[in-house]
Image (cartoon, rainbow, N blue to C red):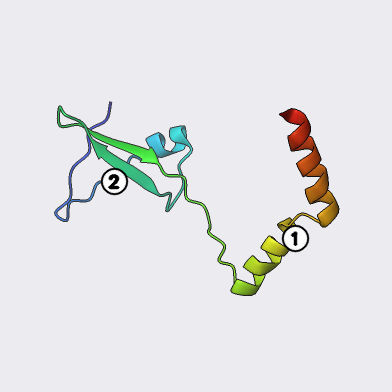
Amino acid sequence: MEVIKLGKKGQVSIPKAILKRLGLEDETMLLIETTADGGIILRPAGVYPIEMYTEEQIEEFFESDRLTDEEAEQLQRQLKDAE
């Protein structure tokens, strides 16, 4: 266990040895929680990029996802057979 000091602005520095042991690098996003007994828990956050689609792209997705008439008929037959 290591002792660290809370800075004037409420900031703490995590010792390099701990960061290395956990595989954390510069600017890693962390989640912070508190426990009922006054503890503080830091966990790496999963941050994933979000892709934004235009209305045209969304329409293309819907169009490519639609069943052909033949596929729709085949599906209807399979559903009737399953009853």
- Vertical position of residue 74 compared to residue 59: above or below: above
**Three-letter residue code for mark 1:** Ser
Location of residue 59 (image quadrant):
bottom right
Q: Residue at x 59, y 68 (%)?
A: 53
* Left or right: 83 in relation to 54: right
Query: Which residue, given by chain and number where applicable, does mark 2 sit on?
Result: 13
- Vertical position of residue 31 compared to residue 68: above or below: above
- Expressed as whole percent of the image width and height from the top left, the position of residue 5 reads 18, 42
Location of residue 35 (image quadrant):
top left
Q: Residue at x 76, y 54 (%)?
A: 67
Q: Nearer the viewer, residue 38 or 76?
A: 76
**Cα distance between the residues tagged 2 and 1:** 51 Å
Q: Which mark is residue 53?
A: none
- Expressed as whole percent of the image width and height from the top left, the position of residue 34 reads 22, 36
Q: Nearer the viewer, residue 50 or 16?
A: 50
- Expressed as whole percent of the image width and height from the top left, the position of residue 17 reads 40, 35
Q: Of callouts 2 and 1, which one flags the residue occurring earlier in the amino acid sequence?
A: 2
**Three-letter residue code for mark 2:** Ser
Query: Which residue, given by chain and number where applicable, does mark 1 sit on?
Result: 64
Binning the other alpha carbons within 10 Å of mark 2 as few (below 14), some (14 to 19) or many (20 upward) gives few
* Left or right: 74 in relation to 37: right
Q: Nearer the viewer, residue 75 or 27?
A: 75
